[in-house]
Amino acid sequence: MSGKLDQLAALARMVKDAEILRFGRAVSERRDIENARRSLQEARRNVQRSSTPDAAHLSGQAALWQIWAGQQLRDLNAGLAMAAAREETARTAAARAAGRADVLARLARRQDQKPRG
């Protein structure tokens, strides 16, 4: 490979790699938020299901914790929506970059296969 088309193909591969990395980070961020949300929901259910009065219930702290947990879930839901939007944007950018890289690599191979004269 040589020439400007080859340089563009190499640049497109680098952009593709960067976009795929960005997409992977977005997926990881969304999963982390989902896991935190799931854990908090489970803890909340466990507190609600508890049938034995404990110090937290008797002192009113369990109710305050439930309020706090509800606020945290609201924040996690908002964060999850934003993370999902970032993931979708990154997915689109990665797909576009992969397509460009593929097309430029094919064009560069064709150019290399042409007889020179």
Image (cartoon, helix red, strand yellow):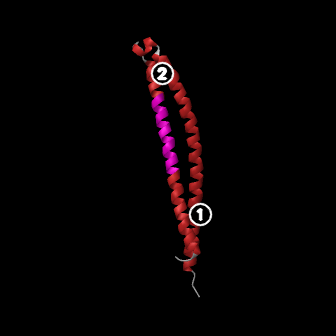
Mark 2, mark 1: which one is toward the viewer? 2
* Circle 1 Cα neighbour tier, 10 Å, few/some/many (<14 / 14–19 / ≥20): some
Picture quarter containing residue 97? bottom right
Magenta residue check for 27: yes
Q: Nearer the viewer, residue 91 or 14?
A: 14
Q: Is residue 110 above or below residue 59?
A: below
Q: Looking at the image, which residue is at 45% across and 19% down?
A: 49
Q: Secondary structure at mark 2?
A: helix
Q: Is residue 76 above or below residue 87?
A: above
* Circle 2 Cα neighbour tier, 10 Å, few/some/many (<14 / 14–19 / ≥20): some
Name which of mark 2 and mark 1 comes first in the sequence. Answer: 2
**For mark 2, what is the residue?**
65
Query: Which labelled disc corresponds to residue 100?
Result: 1
Q: Looking at the image, which residue is at 52% across and 21% down?
A: 67
Left or right: 50 in relation to 14: left
Q: Looking at the picture, how far across and down is residue 41, in whole percent?
A: 48, 28
Q: Looking at the picture, how far across and down is residue 71, in whole percent?
A: 54, 27
Q: Looking at the picture, how far across and down is residue 75, in whole percent?
A: 55, 32
Does the residue at mark 2 contact the one at mark 1 (Cβ under 8 Å)? no
Query: Label 2 sits on what residue type?
Result: Trp
Left or right: 47 in relation to 2: left
Part of the protein shown in magenta: 23-40
